Structures are given as C-alpha cells and as structure tokens.
Image (cartoon, grey):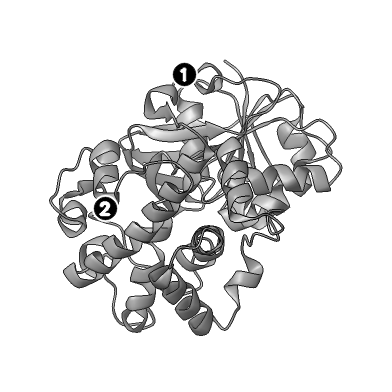
Amino acid sequence: MDRVAVIGAGNSGLATAAHLSLQGHPVNLWNRSPERVSDLLSSHTIDCSGVITGAARLHLVTSDMAEAINGVRMILVTTPADAHSAVAAAMASYVDPEAFVVLNPGRTLGSLEFRNSLLANGCTRVPAVAEAQTIVYTCRSTGPSSVAILAMKSNVLISCLKDERPIEVDEVLPDCLRPHFVPARSTVETSFGNVGMILHCAPVLLNTGWIENTTTRFKYYYDGITPSIARFLERLDRERLSVMAGLGIEGETIVEWFERTYGVVGDCLHSCLQLNEAYRTIEAPTSLNHRYILEDVPCGLVPLEAVGKRLGLPMILTTMVVELASELMGVELRKTGRSLDRLGLDAMTSAELAKTLRSL
C-alpha cells in the first residue's frame, strides 16, 4: 500500500497514524517536538483501543520534515489549525508538487492560509491542498504512545482548493478513509461549516470557574453544555449560517450536522449532545490554554466574524465570544488569528470577497 505521512502526533495524529498502519499503510509520523514522541522514537508502536484496536507499527517517527515527506504523495496534516502556517513553511522546500495535502481539519479558511504560506516560503509548484470540515476521529490520546478512538464520524465534508489540476478526493484518499468522507460543494462549505468553533469556544469561557478549579473535573459535553449554554450556541450557530448564506451557500444547522455525522437525532442541540454516546467520556479542559480557545477562536471565530462584518452582517454573539476570550487570555486574538489581512483578502469589497471565497 502507499506510504502516508501524518503530520502531528496529538490526539488526531496518533489516531490517524494508528488506523492507517493497522490497515496496512506504511506510516511516517512527524512531530515538531522530538520530546513529544520520545517513546515512539524507540518503540515505533502506537497502542490503539476503542472502536479500532491493535498495536500499530509505524514505518518512521521523526521531527525532520524533509525525511517525513520524502517520496510521499499523501500527506495528512493533523496539527491544530494555529500551526498550519508554520507547518506549510517547514514543508515548502520539500513537498512533492504531485502530492495531496489534507488538513484534518482546516477549521476556517485553513487551505487558503496553508497555500499562502507555501508560496510565501518559496514553494513554486504548490501541491493540491484540501481541508476536512472536522477530524474524522472522535479520539483522545491516553499516553504518549497510545490513543483511544471513541468513534469514527460519517459523511465528513472535504473540499480541495481549485487549481489547474482537477482532483477527485475519493480517488486519492486511502481506501479505509474514503467511506467516511463526502465531497463538499466548495471550500465555503467546509470552512464555514466548521462546527468546532461553535461547540468549543463559548462553553469553555462560560465554564471558566469550574475549569480553573483544580479540585473539580467534569464531562465537557455532558455536564458543561447545559440547556442555557446550548441555546446560546444555537444562536451563535445562526450567525455562522448567515455568513454562509451571504456567500451563496445554504448551510446545515448544528443539529442537522449531528444527525448526518453521528446519526444522532435530537430536537435541539442539548438533546443531541446528551444522546451522543461518543461524547460520554470526554473530560473538560483543565486550563484555558487549550486548543478549544487557542485554535478555535483565532482560526474559527476570528475569520467568521471578519467575513461576516465585511458582508455587512451583525456578528453580535461571535464578537462577544472573541472579545471575552481575548480578555480572559490577555491576548488580542484577532491580531494572532486569521484576519482578512493575513489571508490576503483585506483589500476586497464585500462583493469581491464573496466571489473570491466561492471560487476557492
């Protein structure tokens, strides 16, 4: 089977590497910090439990990007979205122009940022860059070389930036992943269909007291997202849908997403969360310094707010969450996030912006 490079050894990276290895693919696993993969450097084995089980033997474990992607045509990036630009910069000199890069997930406009960073760092022949709406695995690492895959999602949307080389996503994904993905209508659908920014940011902020209480642990989805918080998230979700509508794409509600992705049918978001068995054991973060804030605000809500405002939409709740996160973290997350300026879109009028995003 074809060799695959998995970039990032966090929760989803370990799950991806283990799954593909157990399905017979030689896997190169890259992580920026060798300390994070010190156990794997010696054992080359991931212990996988849950809906997929086994001892997954890796072909290569490295912190050398050139070594990781040398001769590899399928590159699956599983790092947090706030690392996409740096990963592209590290990859720019070595990536095969015939390769296929998939951001798992892209969050909001990740594929555009990734391509821009490749070009800015000297990549003259850019490979195909795709983004998934969400990671296909519901998973948690249980140790430096072990992972629990709690569920595999269905019908995960995936899109590829349009370029001169047409790509059929179903033809290039590994066989074991193809059944879990469906092609999106455009990058607008994957980027602004990003439900992580709805489910992650506000609940963390609204549970700050419990999260910073060192004597208390609670289940993130089951305990932390109460009926009132869930109703707030549904209203926040309507702002997301208004941006999609402004870009000419009818999006699905977060309740509809749960039915399509997990097969969970509820009459509201709160009931969907309570009915989703895959979420039952997931613990809340123990700090605000967590990807639910550091990734999902700057790489999700910040570009959502920016595009919405450029389209003339009242992004009241989105702005509220971005500002509360910035105040609690003591960081101006709009400055560190995917602003229109950083994405190369700031000089555009609302009509030009909508046309450009629809063309991606």
User: Which amino acid does the dot numbered 2 rest on?
Assistant: Tyr
Please tell me whether mark 1 sits on a helix, a strand or a loop: loop
Disc 2 crowd, CA 10 A, few/some/many (<14, 14-19, 20+): some
Q: Which image quadrant for residue 72?
A: top right
Q: Which mark is residue 317?
A: none
User: Which amino acid does the dot numbered 1 rest on?
Assistant: Asp
Please tell me whether mark 2 sits on a helix, a strand or a loop: helix
Task: Pick the quarter of the image with the N terminus.
Answer: top right
Q: Position of residue 234 (x, y in %)?
A: 27, 61
Q: Which image quadrant for residue 238?
A: bottom left
Q: Residue at x 56, y 64 (%)?
A: 298
Q: Position of residue 286 (x, y in %)?
A: 40, 73
Q: Residue at x 50, y 42 (%)?
A: 188
Q: Is residue 99 above or below residue 150?
A: above
Q: Is residue 73 above or below residue 305?
A: above
Disc 1 crowd, CA 10 A, few/some/many (<14, 14-19, 20+): few
Front-lying residue, 124 or 1? 124
Task: Pick the quarter of the image with the C terminus.
Answer: top right
Q: Which image quadrant for residue 337?
A: bottom right
- Residue indicated by mark 1: 175
Q: Position of residue 3 (x, y in %)?
A: 62, 23
Q: Give me the C-alpha separation between circle 1 and circle 2.
A: 26 Å
**Visible residue check, residue 182:** yes
Q: Is residue 207 above or below residue 176?
A: below
Q: Position of residue 245 (x, y in %)?
A: 41, 48
- Residue indicated by mark 2: 279
Q: Does residue 235 appear to the left or right of 316 in the view shown?
A: left
